[in-house]
Image (cartoon, rainbow, N blue to C red):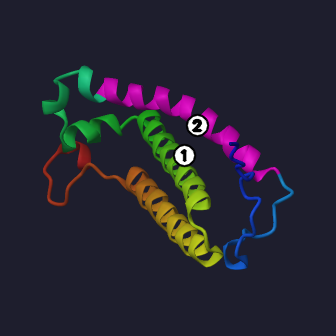
């Protein structure tokens, strides 16, 4: 007795679940390449971030407003944290975009989910970038000589 298993997707798919027209560009290939390259760079950035914040100095108990202010006094650490923020958000958003494309069956659902994802990603990137570049270690009313 033999059992015949039909080929995947060989049966008729309801039109409301069909995907949109296929892209002829190389966006998916570039997104795949971005995930691999950004993943390697993120590993270096994350371990550098963890090492400087947790191993150098007093460890986790030494992390405070003053620690961040001192660290961000140097432009290299602001750029380091900015690149870490941007790459982490774009890497994560690209991964979630792939999951949405794989599991959201209806085109309208995919469009809404990806729209929410893109808005949230842009919001976090803009807000985080503003925090990094507009950070002022001088609290209003501070009597520190550096703030004068």
Q: Is residue 51 magenta?
A: yes
Residue drawn where x is 24% and y is 43% of the image:
146
- Residue 15 image position (x, y, % from top left): 73, 77
Please report whichever mark, 2 or 1, sits nearer to the chain's N-terminal start: 2
Q: In the structure shown, which secondary structural element does the residue marked by tag 2 occupy? A: helix
Query: Is 66 or 41 nearer to us in this picture?
Result: 41
Q: In the structure shown, which secondary structural element does the residue marked by tag 1 occupy? A: helix
Label 2 with label 1: CB-CB less than 8 Å: yes
Residue drawn where x is 25% and y is 21% of the image:
55
Apparent side of residue 76 relative to residue 30 in the rendered image (left or right) = left
Q: Disc 1 designates what residue?
A: 91
Please, is residue 91 above or below residue 22 in the view? above
- Residue 137 image position (x, y, % from top left): 26, 48
Q: Is residue 76 magenta?
A: no
Q: Residues within 10 Å of mark 1 (few under 14, many from 20)?
A: many
Decide whether the magenta segment is chiefly helix, strand or loop: helix
Quadrant in which the N terminus appears: top right
Quarter of the figure with residue 30: top right
Residue most extreme to the front: 1
Please, is residue 92 above or below residue 11 in the view? above
Query: Is 44 or 32 nearer to us in this picture?
Result: 32
Q: Disc 2 designates what residue?
A: 38
Residue most extreme to the top: 56
Please, is residue 67 above or below residue 116 in the view? above
């Amino acid at each position: 007795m033999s059992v015949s298993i039909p080929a995947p997707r060989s049966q008729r798919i309801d039109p409301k679940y069909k995907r949109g027209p296929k892209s002829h560009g190389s966006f998916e290939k570039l997104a795949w390449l971005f995930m691999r390259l950004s993943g390697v760079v993120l590993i270096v950035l994350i371990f550098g971030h963890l090492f400087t914040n947790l191993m150098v100095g007093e460890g986790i108990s030494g992390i405070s407003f003053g620690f961040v202010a001192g660290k961000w006094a140097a432009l290299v650490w602001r750029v380091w944290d900015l690149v870490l923020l941007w790459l982490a958000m774009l890497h994560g958003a690209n991964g979630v975009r792939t999951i949405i494309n794989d599991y959201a069956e209806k085109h309208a659902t995919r469009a809404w989910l990806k729209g929410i994802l893109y808005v949230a990603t842009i919001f976090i990137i803009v807000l985080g970038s503003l925090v990094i570049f507009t950070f002022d270690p001088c609290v209003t009313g501070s009597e520190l000589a550096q703030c004068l």
